[in-house]
Amino acid sequence: MKIFIEATRLLVKNYFILIPRFLGFYFFFGLIFTFIPGFGWLLAMPLSVGIAYATSYIALGGETVDRPTLFMGYEGNTTGKNILYLAIKWGLVALAVSALWRPVFLFLAQRLAHFFEGDDILFYSSLALSALLPALVVTTLLAMTPYLLADPKFDQRVKNPLTTSMKMLKGHYGKLILLRIFFIPWFIWILAGGIVMLILFIYMIFSGEVPYPLFIKSWLISVPVTLFIVLPWYHMVHTVLYVELRDSV
């Protein structure tokens, strides 16, 4: 609760300092991802280091960020390592999902098909949720990686940010999980709802009908709420936890 209160205070106080950087992150990440097929997501990853620097600077006592930070993940000779470490992190997430999701997917598909018969939204949402479980495990272990990469005091030449993240969180995973539980329902709604929206969009193309209009409106409204409130808040909560554990390794 103390971390939530501090993160909320910092976000509210510095909201108009941080939100332009988050908007820049969304824009440039989408731009790079869209116009560089295949490898765009890799090249866009250091943008998360800039976001981590901005939130960390504020959480460590800075009132304002003294220079543009969004592209600091590309500065100096750390670009390649930043891409490498973040690619390994999300590569492990993808590996965990691909290795564990198929059996879970098949298990759920067989048992939920009859239970949710006639209710396609609940059926496909339940299947989509099964992919989140292995991803949550890996992202929890490596949650501090971008904050370590953004920390000027962290020396990548001496320490590995992936293993350092796990060491830093040792004994504190319960705290991180409790913090994340608050956001999980919202992210489930956004991710599972996005998959269902894609299915409904395809259905609309071929049928000409608009199914579940209330669901569609509700999900579309929740997207800007996620971008402008939930994600900045989520990052600030992680930042406050990072600052609390910063000197433990």
Image (tube, rainbow, N blue to C red):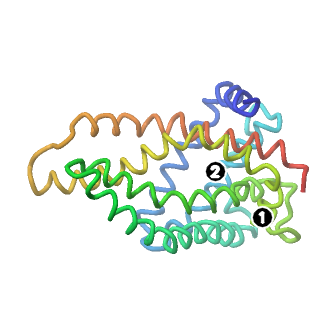
Total marks placed: 2
Residue 16 sits in quarter: top right
165 vs 19, left or right, is right
Residue, far left: 208
Q: Which residue is denoted by mark 2 in the rendering?
A: 70
Picture layout, residue 194 above or below residue 60: below
Q: Quadrant of the C terminus?
A: bottom right
Picture layout, residue 188 above or below residue 166: above
43 vs 189, left or right, is right
Indicate which disc, 2 or 1, sits on the residue closer to the N terminus: 2
Picture layout, residue 6 above or below residue 201: above
Mark 2 touching mark 1, by CB under 8 A? no
Residue 133 sits in quarter: bottom right
Q: Residue at x 75, y 59 (%)?
A: 149
Q: Which residue is denoted by mark 1 in the rendering?
A: 161
Crowd class of label 2 (few under 14; some 14 to 19; many from 20; radius 10 Å): many
Q: Secondary structure at mark 2?
A: loop
Q: Name the foreground residue: 82 vs 169.
A: 169
Crowd class of label 1 (few under 14; some 14 to 19; many from 20; radius 10 Å): many
Q: CA distance from mark 2 to mark 1?
A: 20 Å
**Label 1 sits on what residue type?**
Pro
Residue 194 place in picture, x, y as percent: 36, 50
